[in-house]
Amino acid sequence: EFVLTQSPATLSLSPGERATLSCWASQSVSSNLAWYQQKPGQAPRLLIYDASNRATGIPARFSGSGSGTDFTLIISSLEPEDFAVYYCQQRGNWPRGITFGQGTRLEIK
Amino acid sequence: EVQLMESGGGLVKPGGSLRLSCATSGFTFSNAWMSWVRQAPGKGLEWVGRIKSKTDGGTTDYAAPLKGRFTISRDDSKNTLYLQMNNLKTDDTAVYYCATVLRFLEWLPDWGQGTLVTVSS
């Protein structure tokens, strides 16, 4: 079974600090990984696709890296609006389909 | 501006059926691949399935645990996506989102606000 594992489950930081979120794939997905942000009561928003490309309108403080099985989302300097839940997603090979990680909650310290 | 609006959610008894709709505007729906994603209360995101555009075959793919109970369809004349859910179980209780899918790339750039489905006796 293919699994995406995100770490940590919860990250407590202050505005202005740097956030590092991780996503591990149980088997290689090359660069086929995306990151989403979800705020309470809202739909997810695509942040990063193909592991490192920012989606339209996403601020430069968000960056993604990695390939194979290890991926990282970095928020260089946290703004108040960045506190949310973050999910990684792989597109993989069919018929496996799309898989999401279990999420990392980024909360204000 | 891309707009997606889900409807059709509500309370249904276990074993019942429900059809969700996703009305779209702001893009050429007939060329679009579309997905459904759900989120149980307080839980993470779970992909439900995807339908390709008719020009790309119009085929559907589903998450393995849901195959056979859920059916995705589209009406390009109405710019609307559907999710037919049969034999519903309490575990199907969730907010159901429709989303656009980047063709062949499978990223989900645009999402609706979701509709809540509650399966309870």
Image (spheres, coloured by chain):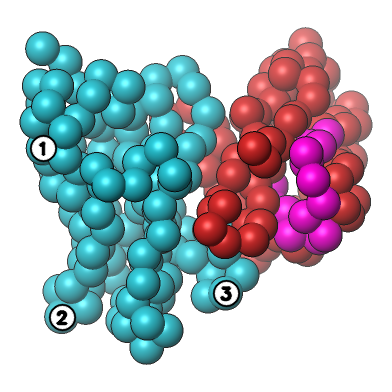
Three-letter residue code for mark 1: Ser
Q: Residue B104, labelled with which disc?
A: 3
Q: Are marks 2 and 1 in contact (CB under 8 Å)?
A: no
Asked if residue A32 is among those painted magenta in the image, a careful observer would answer yes
Residue B26 is at least partly visible in this image? no
Inspect the image, locate mark 3, and give the three-letter code of the amino acid beneath it: Phe
The residue lying furthest to the bottom in this view is B55
Whether pointer 1 and pointer 3 mark residues with C-beta atoms closer than 8 Å, the reply is: no
Q: Which residue is mark 1?
A: B17
| Kind of residue indicated by mark 2 | Ser
- Kind of element beneath mark 2: loop
For the magenta stretch, what is the residue range? A22-37
In the rendered image, the vertical position of residue A26 relative to residue A54, given as above or below: above
Q: Position of residue B17 (x, y in %)?
A: 10, 37
Pointers 1 and 3 within a single chain: yes
* Chain in cyan (letter): B
